[in-house]
Every structure is written in structure tokens, then in C-alpha cells.
Image: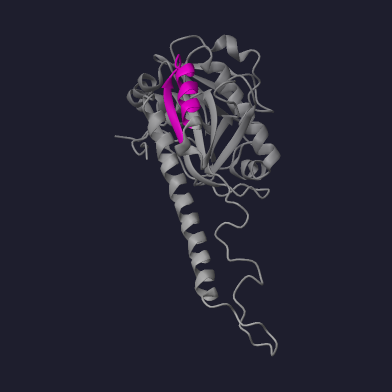
């Protein structure tokens, strides 16, 4: 049995455009990219001048995505967006210049933060527009095939898995939640400043330390260390509390990769990065859960950040290796 044709670039980088919105104001904000480098397949054979590739943005089931395409440009330099029927499914695709979307050209473009942001926003704009009119499974950024026939063959080969994903996400949206440990006080967990440690009395006229001063100093240091550990443990418990509360109102949940500390000197440590698949009509429930969590003294040691609701990118994979972590 022959394998279905693989895309030239199944996931050049894995990009999740996450609208920076709040639980109480889901319409606010603009998409911001979250990028996790992925393995890059071998470069395709050289293409002739003027040839095009087929870029797949999203696959739909039910509804008519066509009206959403007229005002959505897709990738810069490509042709108009169009639909590609494949049995009961419809792919939204764009013809893009092969020279500009070759492995080398994409590597150069997407290594530039501005270009990456532009491409990711263009991709997300198509996905969001289509998802507003039809049940939709978003494909990764820069999913390219040599021609339409290969797209059709690939979708037919995994049609059953696609239908399973459609059944899972139907009528649901994704909420993203990140939990950070609140920054420690400036002197927390550190030794006292110079001059507070007991004197050694080495100078001829140095005043001898008071009896027990050394033990008191060490006790203060140990106390600070214990306080820091207690605060860290409390933050970890709070993150688990947040996760458990949101899983309680979700159809599915996934823990995502923890991000490194933020740039620009943000001292917060990320403790939880998770996505929750929740029924579309439960926005008020989500807001109420978050309000209770933020008012709970048990979560005083953490900051909770929320994005959504948005297209369920984290639950759209058709492979068998995804899980809820």
C-alpha cells in the first residue's frame, strides 16, 4: 500500500497564533505568534521558473467557507484564496510562487521576526475567517504540496482521522491559560547584605561579636531559604489548582511546553502553559471559574494569564501522538 503524498513542508515552524484577549473581553487584542521550531524536511527538487505550489491553510466540513475568502488575502505574493473540494471535505488553498516558498527562501523569510509575524498573521486571518463560517481544522503554517492532486490524495488518506478531529472540536473553542509564579521580594532567599554577618573580630580594635550572633545569622539565612521553598511549593500547588478547575469545565485539555523566562527582565517563572477545549457557549462559565481562582487565597502566589476564545489549534492534530500531557 503506497503512502499518501506528504507535504513539502508539513510544519516549517510550528506556529500558534494566539489572540491576546482576556476572559472578560474576548474581542480585544490582536494575534501574537508563539513559535516552536520543528524539524525541517529535506528540500524539494528544484522548481521551474514561474511554477507554483499549493498552500493549504485549513480544511472544512459543513458550511460554506467561500464567502469568507473574498476579503482575506492569504500570503503576500500568492494568488486568490480558493476552495478545493475533496469528498465531504473542503480545503482552503492558495497558489503561491514556488521560488518564494522554496525551503531556502522560507528559511530566510521566517528567520526574520517581522516576516514571521507577517506570515503567521496572514495564516491566522484565513483560519479565523473560515472558522467563522464552517467547522474548520487549521493546518500548520506553510503546509505546501506540489499540486492539487497531492492535496486530494493526502486528505483522502487521512479522512477518517480528520472526521474524528471534527467530531472532537465541533461547537468548541480553545482557551489558553498560563500561570506564572509571582516575583519574590527583592531580598527573599538571599543572604543579608554585607556587614550584617557576624564580625570575625580580626581588626585589633574590632568589637567582639555578641554570644550566639553566628547562630542567629545562620538561622536567619535558613529561614529565608525555607520561606522561598514554601513560596515555590505554594505556587506549584496553585498552578495545579488552576489546571484542575479548568479541566472541570473542559471537553479536553493539553499541557504545552513551558516557556523560558520572558525577555526584557521579566522575572516571573512559568509554571503552567495549557490549552482547554471548551464548549463555545460556556464563555461566562470560564470567566466565573477564573474569577473564583483569582479571588482564592490559595492562588495569591501566582499570576494567571488567559487568551481566547479562539480556533482550537492545540486540538487539531490528526496524529496519534498528541495527548493531554
Residue 132: x, y in percent? 53, 14
Which quadrant of the view contains residue 29?
A: top right
38 or 79, nearer to the observer = 38
Q: Work out whether 8 lies above or below 228.
A: above
Q: Quadrant of the C terminus?
A: top left
- Say whether residue 218 is visible: yes
In the rendering, at what x and y percent does residue 255 appear? 42, 38
- Give the number of marks: 0
Which residue is at a point 61% across and 23% down the rendered structure image? 125
Q: Which of the two residues, 66 or 100, is positioned nearer the viewer here?
A: 66
Kindly give the residue lying farthest to the front in the view shown. 211
Camera-side residue of 98 and 267: 267
Question: Between residues 235 and 226, which one lies in front from this camera angle?
Answer: 226
Q: Looking at the image, is 202 positioned above or below residue 67?
A: below
Residue pushed farthest bottom?
204
Looking at the image, residue 43 lies above or below residue 283 = below
Can residue 138 be seen at all in this image of the molecule?
no
**Magenta highlight range:** 274-293
The answer to if 287 sits in the magenta stretch is: yes
Q: Is residue 162 left or right of residue 43?
A: left
Residue 82 at x, y percent in the picture = 57, 17
Q: Residue at x 57, y 62 (%)?
A: 190
Indicate the colouring scheme.
one colour
Q: Looking at the image, which residue is at 43% across and 50% down? A: 233
Q: Residue furthest left?
A: 1
The spot of residue 91 in percent (x, y) is: 49, 20
Q: Which quadrant: the N terminus? A: top left
Residue 64 lies in magenta, yes or no? no
Amino acid at each position: 500500500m503506497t503512502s499518501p503524498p506528504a507535504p513539502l513542508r508539513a510544519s516549517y515552524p510550528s506556529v500558534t497564533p494566539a489572540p491576546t484577549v482576556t476572559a472578560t473581553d474576548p474581542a480585544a487584542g490582536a494575534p501574537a505568534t508563539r513559535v516552536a521550531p520543528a524539524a525541517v524536511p529535506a528540500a524539494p527538487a528544484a522548481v521551474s521558473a514561474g511554477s507554483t505550489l499549493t498552500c493549504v491553510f485549513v480544511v472544512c466540513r459543513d458550511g460554506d467557507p467561500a464567502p469568507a475568502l473574498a476579503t482575506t488575502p492569504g500570503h503576500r505574493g500568492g494568488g486568490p484564496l480558493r476552495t478545493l473540494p475533496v469528498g465531504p471535505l473542503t480545503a482552503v488553498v492558495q497558489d503561491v510562487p514556488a521560488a518564494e516558498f522554496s525551503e531556502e527562501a522560507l528559511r530566510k523569510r521566517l528567520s526574520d521576526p517581522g516576516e514571521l509575524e507577517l506570515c503567521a498573521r496572514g495564516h491566522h486571518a484565513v483560519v479565523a475567517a473560515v472558522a467563522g463560517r464552517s467547522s474548520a481544522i487549521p493546518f500548520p503554517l506553510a503546509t505546501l504540496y506540489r499540486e492539487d492532486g497531492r492535496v486530494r490524495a493526502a486528505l483522502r488518506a487521512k479522512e477518517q482521522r480528520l472526521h474524528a478531529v471534527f467530531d472532537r472540536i465541533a461547537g468548541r473553542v480553545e482557551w489558553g491559560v498560563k500561570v506564572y509564579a509571582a516575583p519574590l521580594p527583592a531580598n527573599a532567599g538571599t543572604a543579608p547584605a554585607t556587614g550584617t554577618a557576624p564580625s570575625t573580630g580580626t581588626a585589633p580594635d574590632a568589637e567582639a561579636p555578641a554570644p550566639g550572633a553566628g547562630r542567629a545569622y545562620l538561622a536567619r539565612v535558613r529561614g529565608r531559604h525555607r520561606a522561598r521553598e514554601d513560596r515555590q511549593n505554594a505556587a506549584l500547588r496553585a498552578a495545579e489548582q488552576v489546571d484542575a478547575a479548568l479541566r472541570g469545565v473542559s471537553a479536553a485539555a493539553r499541557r504545552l511546553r513551558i516557556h523560558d523566562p520572558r525577555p526584557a527582565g521579566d522575572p516571573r517563572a512559568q509554571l503552567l502553559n495549557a490549552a482547554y477545549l471548551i464548549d463555545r457557549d460556556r464563555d461566562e462559565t470560564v470567566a466565573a471559574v477564573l474569577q473564583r481562582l483569582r479571588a482564592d487565597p490559595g492562588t495569591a502566589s501566582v499570576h494567571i494569564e488567559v487568551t481566547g476564545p479562539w480556533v482550537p489549534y492545540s486540538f487539531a492534530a490528526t496524529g496519534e501522538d498528541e495527548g493531554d500531557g
